């Protein structure tokens, strides 16, 4: 987590270096984000897991590569929420439980932009990591590989300021098919599968072009 924040600080500092030192550098954008996170639900043999939807917030750093209409994004988003597990009958040792947690995504990817003007549509995708941060000391945190598909619109109000509206379809994946959230229900629980839970978010951001 600390390394992610250090990286974001580093790229921001690089972006603030005077243009005279990087005469040929591409445009860069910093975009604080806020919106709504769709928590998602998954059925397992042992029961059903539900993650409650909540407010999400984060920060995005983008490099624009004109005239191809391509941008490179590095982003971090977080949604503080809660997880509930409803046990199925017939599985001794499993019981209903719930606890506070947060869904975090650290992602890097690219977009294809259209309509090279004040209003620009874009579609793209990212890869990275999903960090499910448990607030219960008896439940371990979980790190997963993640991918997403995204699309939205940018509206530039001036040469330096704009608005970014975006939607993402998030897919945290268990590539190893190993244990997930060990400790659910007070017992050692191992869930396997390709996609741990389908999530998504809708965000609005203030574009600051450097």
Image (cartoon, grey):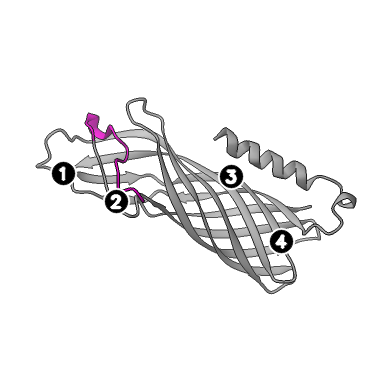
Q: Which residues are magenta?
A: 175-188
Circle 4 sits on which residue? 64
179 lies above or below 159? above
Dot 2 lies on which element? strand
Q: Quadrant of residue 47?
A: top left
Q: Nearer the viewer, mark 1 or mark 4?
A: 4
- The x, y position of residue 20, in whole percent, is 90, 51
Give the mark, 4 or 3, whose residue is nearer the N terminus: 3
Per the rendering, the mark at residue 58 is 3
Give the mark, 1 or 4, whose residue is nearer the N terminus: 4
Dot 3 lies on which element? strand
- The x, y position of residue 105, in whole percent, is 50, 46
- The x, y position of residue 64, in whole percent, is 71, 61
Give the mark, 1 or 3, whose residue is nearer the N terminus: 3
Left or right: 164 as drawn, with respect to 168: right
Residue at left offset 48%, top offset 58%: 148
Q: Quadrant of residue 97?
A: top left
Give the mark, 2 or 4, whose residue is nearer the N terminus: 2
Left or right: 175 as drawn, with respect to 108: left
Check if mark 2's residue and mark 3's residue have beta carbons within 8 Å.
no
Q: Nearer the viewer, residue 179 or 201?
A: 179
Per the rendering, the mark at residue 88 is 1
């Amino acid at each position: 987590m600390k390394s992610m924040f250090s990286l974001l600080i580093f790229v921001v500092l690089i972006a603030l270096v005077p243009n005279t030192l990087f005469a040929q550098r591409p445009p860069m954008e910093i975009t604080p984000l806020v919106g709504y996170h769709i928590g998602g639900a998954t059925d397992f043999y042992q029961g059903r897991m539900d993650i409650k939807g909540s407010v999400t917030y984060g920060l995005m750093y983008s490099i624009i590569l004109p005239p191809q209409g391509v941008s490179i994004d590095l982003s971090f988003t977080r949604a503080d929420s809660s997880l509930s597990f409803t046990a199925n009958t017939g599985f001794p040792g499993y019981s209903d439980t719930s606890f506070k947690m947060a869904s975090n995504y650290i992602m890097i990817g690219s977009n294809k932009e259209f309509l090279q003007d004040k209003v620009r549509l874009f579609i793209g995708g990212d890869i990275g990591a999903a960090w499910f941060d448990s607030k219960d000391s008896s439940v371990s945190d979980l790190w997963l590989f993640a991918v997403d598909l995204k699309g939205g619109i940018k509206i530039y109000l001036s040469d330096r300021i704009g608005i970014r509206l975006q939607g993402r379809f998030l897919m945290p994946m268990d590539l190893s098919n190993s244990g997930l959230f060990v400790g659910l229900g007070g017992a050692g629980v191992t869930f396997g599968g390709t996609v741990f839970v389908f999530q998504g978010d809708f965000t609005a951001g203030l574009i600051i072009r450097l």
